[in-house]
Amino acid sequence: MNEQYPSVLLEKAVNEFAKLPGVGRKTAMRLVLYLLRQDVAMVEAFGNAIITLKHEVKYCKVCHNISDTDMCRICSNPQRDASVVCVVETIRDVMAIEATQQFRGLYHVLGGVISPMDGVGPSDLQIDSLVERIRKGGIKEIILALSTTMEGDTTAFYIYRKVEPLGVKLSVIARGVSVGDELEYADEVTLGRSIVNRTPFNGTV
């Protein structure tokens, strides 16, 4: 046991919290000590929520968004425009765009971007399932709402090459989102305008 910890159990808990992204050991210690001060019912509810999430959460069979059922609430909503699909990297991007209340179409979550440096290739992403959705018919426009990074642009171009022969309109969000930015960090007004003011995509950015 590390001598700075009075308890092995405390050390183990801190070690687990410190594995979370953006959580250093000092923050992990603060979180663990906070939970220790709470009553048992609160801590059990906290733990059970995480365990239940991991065991029971599903991924939408259509768009790959997180869902409680086989098809997410967005895909199953008859009020949404199924002819327009916004392609994003992550589930966080869906949440960011939904917060703008400017988009009424559907989504397609890739699960990341092409990044050879990180060992992520096209086959690791939900690109083939996007192509299959388009081939089934009914989709008129694909909006590429990917991060304005080199990896995002590479992914957009790859999707363009796969989708362009299928005859759908291809758009990219307006560059109100600064180059190098990730969507989840853009403010709602800027992101909303970027969706509304999208421009045709022809393989170049």
Image: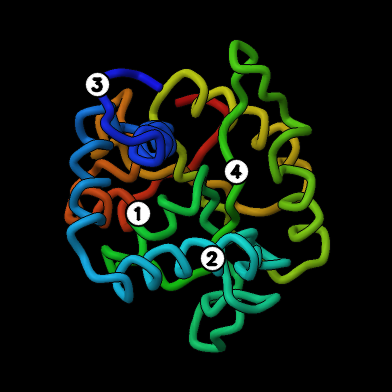
Q: Nearer the viewer, mark 2 or mark 1?
A: 2
Tell me the number on the disc at residue 195: 1
Mark 1 Cα shell of 10 Å, populated few (<14), some (14-19), many (≥20)? many
Q: Position of residue 87 (x, y in %)?
A: 55, 50
**Looking at the image, which residue is at 50% across and 80% down?**
80
Q: Amino acid at mark 2?
A: Leu
**Looking at the image, which residue is at 49% across and 69% down?**
105
Q: Amino acid at mark 1?
A: Ile
CA distance separating discs 2 and 3: 33 Å
Is 136 on the left-hand or right-hand side of 97? right
Residue at the spot of label 4: 111
| First-in-chain label (2 vs 1) | 2
Check disc 2 and report its element: helix, strand or loop. helix
Q: Nearer the viewer, mark 3 or mark 1?
A: 3
Q: Position of residue 82 (x, y in %)?
A: 59, 74
Task: Return the residue nearer the eye: 126 or 144.
Answer: 126
| Residue 90 drawn above or below residue 49 | above
Check disc 1 and report its element: helix, strand or loop. helix
**Looking at the image, which residue is at 21% across and 47% down?**
33
| First-in-chain label (2 vs 3) | 3
CA distance separating discs 3 and 4: 40 Å
| First-in-chain label (3 vs 1) | 3
Is 187 on the left-hand or right-hand side of 42? left
CA distance separating discs 3 and 1: 51 Å
